[in-house]
Image (cartoon, rainbow, N blue to C red):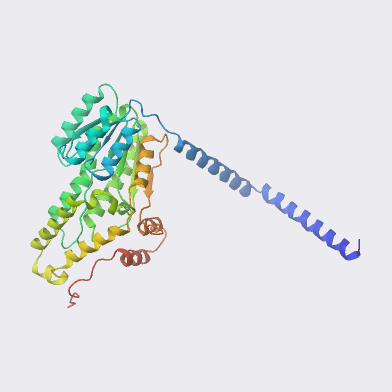
C-alpha cells in the first residue's frame, strides 16, 4: 500500500472516529436525550391512537338517530348504517316524502322513520318521547346532527328574518336536538356527531348566514366535547368540503326555496341598495353558484366514510375535514388548513379569486 493510500485510510479512520465521538457526545447531552425520548413517545402514541381509530364497535343492539333524512347525506347514512346492523332512527321533516317512504321500504325492522322538525320545541320533545319508548331501558349510541339548509346573498341583501330562519335550522336546531337526546346518549357513553362544513372554518363572501351558523356549530361542538369528557361521551365534528353538487343542499326543492329567497331579498331591499348592486345581482350570483356545483365531488362517499367512522370507531377523531371537489385538490379545504399560518390578505385574495361575488352595478361614491 502506497504512502498516499495509507494517509487516506488513516484520514478516513480518524474522521469516522471523530464523527462517532461527536455523535456519542451529542446523545449524552440532556437536551438531545429528552428530545429523542419525547419524539419516540409522540411517535408511539400516534401509532396507538391510529390503531385504536381503526378498531370498530359492533352494531348489535345499538341505536343511532339521524336528523335530516328526507334526502341527501342523511338518507344515505341511514341506509348504510341499517345495512351494517344498526337500529336506525331516521328523522324526516316530512314522513310522507319520497325519501321517508324509500327508507321505510329499504330498512326493514331495523329502520324507524320518525317525524322531526328541528326548529320546533314541540316536535323535538315529541320525537324524544317516541325514541325513549323505542329504546326502553337502553341508551342511544349516537346522534348525527345532519339537518341543514343554505342560502346565498350579501349581508346588505339578506333580511334579519332570513338570518334567523337559517340559524334556527343549522345552529339552534342542532343545539335543541342535542339537548333533548343527551340524557339517552350519556346512558351508554355514546357520541354526538355534528355535521358542520369547511365554511365553519373559513368564511366565504355571499354566504354569511350559512357561515355564521356553521362557525357557531363548531364552537358549540367544541364546548360540548370538553363538557362531555367526564361522562365518557365523545363529540365529533364532520366538516365536508366541496360536495354541494352531490348533496341535497342544491336539490330541486332547495333551489326553488333560494329563488324565492332572492325575490324576498329584492322586495325588501331599499332603492339605494338595489341601485348599488343592480337588479340582476342576485340572479347572477345564483347562476354562478349553480355552475360552481359542477366542480364538486361527484358523490358523498368520502363524507359517508367519515360519518361511519364517527359512529363505529372506538376512538374517532375529534374532527374530520373531508376534501371534496373533482379537481386536483379542494381549494376550500386547502384554505382552511392554511388559515392559522397565512396572513389574512393572502387568504382573502385566494378566496375572492376562487369564490368572489359578481360585480356590482355601480362603484360606491365617496363624499
Farthest residue in the top direction? 137
Task: Provide residue 366's location: percent of width, then percent of height.
Answer: 19, 77
Find residue 173 and report its image quarter. Answer: top left
Instruction: Estimate the x, y position of residue 60 in percent, counting from the top left.
Output: 35, 26
Q: Is residue 188 above or below residue 34?
A: above
Residue 311 visible within the image: yes
Question: Is the residue 230 above or below the residue 366 in the image?
Answer: above
Residue plotted at (35% across, 46% down):
301
Vertical side of 333 occupied by 47: above or below: above
Left or right of 20, for residue 162 = left
Identify the residue at horizontal 15%, vertical 68% (top origin). Answer: 280
In terms of depth relative to the viewer, which is nearer, 192 or 62? 62
Q: How far from the left and from the top, in percent, is residue 104?
A: 22, 33
Task: State the residue in front, 213 or 70.
Answer: 70
| Viewer-nearest residue: 326 or 341 | 326
Residue 205 showing in the rendered view? no
Residue 351 occupies which quadrant of the picture?
bottom left
Q: Nearer the viewer, residue 180 or 238?
A: 238
| 319 left or right of 24 in image | left
Q: Left or right: where does residue 277 sit relative to residue 214?
A: left
Residue positioned 27% across, 41% down in the render: 74
Q: Residue 243 location, x and y as percent? A: 31, 52
Residue with the most extreme front position: 105
On-image quarter of the N terminus = bottom right
Quadrant where the image shows the C terminus: bottom left
Residue 362 position (above or below residue 48): below
Check the image and name the residue furthest to the bottom: 367
Amino acid at each position: 500500500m502506497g504512502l498516499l493510500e495509507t494517509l487516506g485510510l488513516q484520514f478516513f479512520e480518524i474522521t469516522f472516529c471523530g464523527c462517532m465521538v461527536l455523535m456519542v457526545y451529542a446523545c449524552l447531552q440532556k437536551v438531545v436525550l429528552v428530545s429523542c425520548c419525547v419524539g419516540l413517545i409522540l411517535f408511539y402514541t400516534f401509532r396507538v391512537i391510529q390503531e385504536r381509530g381503526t378498531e370498530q364497535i359492533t352494531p348489535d343492539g345499538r341505536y343511532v338517530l339521524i336528523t335530516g333524512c328526507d334526502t341527501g347525506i342523511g338518507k344515505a347514512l341511514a341506509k348504510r348504517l341499517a345495512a351494517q346492523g344498526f337500529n336506525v332512527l331516521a328523522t324526516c321533516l316530512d314522513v310522507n316524502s319520497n325519501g321517508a317512504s324509500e327508507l321505510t321500504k329499504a330498512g326493514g325492522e331495523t329502520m324507524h322513520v320518525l317525524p322531526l322538525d328541528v326548529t320546533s320545541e314541540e316536535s323535538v320533545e315529541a320525537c324524544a318521547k317516541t325514541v325513549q319508548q323505542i329504546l326502553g331501558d337502553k341508551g342511544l349510541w349516537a346522534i348525527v346532527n345532519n339537518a341543514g339548509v343554505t342560502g346565498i346573498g350579501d349581508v346588505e341583501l339578506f333580511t334579519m328574518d332570513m338570518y334567523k330562519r337559517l340559524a334556527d335550522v343549522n345552529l339552534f336546531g342542532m343545539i335543541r336536538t342535542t339537548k333533548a337526546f343527551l340524557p339517552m346518549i350519556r346512558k351508554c357513553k355514546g357520541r354526538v356527531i355534528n355535521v358542520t362544513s369547511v365554511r365553519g372554518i373559513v368564511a366565504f363572501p355571499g354566504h354569511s348566514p350559512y357561515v355564521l351558523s356553521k362557525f357557531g356549530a363548531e364552537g358549540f361542538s367544541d364546548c360540548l366535547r370538553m363538557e362531555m369528557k367526564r361522562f365518557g361521551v365523545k363529540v365529533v365534528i364532520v366538516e365536508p368540503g366541496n360536495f354541494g353538487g352531490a348533496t341535497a343542499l342544491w336539490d330541486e326543492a332547495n333551489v326553488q326555496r333560494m329563488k324565492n329567497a332572492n325575490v324576498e331579498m329584492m322586495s325588501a331591499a331599499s332603492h339605494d341598495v338595489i341601485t348599488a348592486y343592480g337588479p340582476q345581482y342576485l340572479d347572477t350570483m345564483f347562476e354562478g353558484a349553480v355552475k360552481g356545483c359542477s366542480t364538486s365531488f361527484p358523490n358523498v362517499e368520502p363524507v359517508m366514510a367519515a360519518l361511519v367512522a364517527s359512529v363505529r370507531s372506538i376512538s374517532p377523531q375529534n374532527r374530520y375535514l373531508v376534501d371534496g371537489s373533482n379537481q386536483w385538490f379542494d381549494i376550500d379545504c386547502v384554505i382552511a388548513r392554511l388559515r392559522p399560518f397565512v396572513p389574512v390578505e393572502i387568504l382573502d385574495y385566494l378566496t375572492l379569486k376562487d369564490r368572489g361575488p359578481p360585480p356590482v352595478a355601480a362603484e360606491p361614491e365617496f363624499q
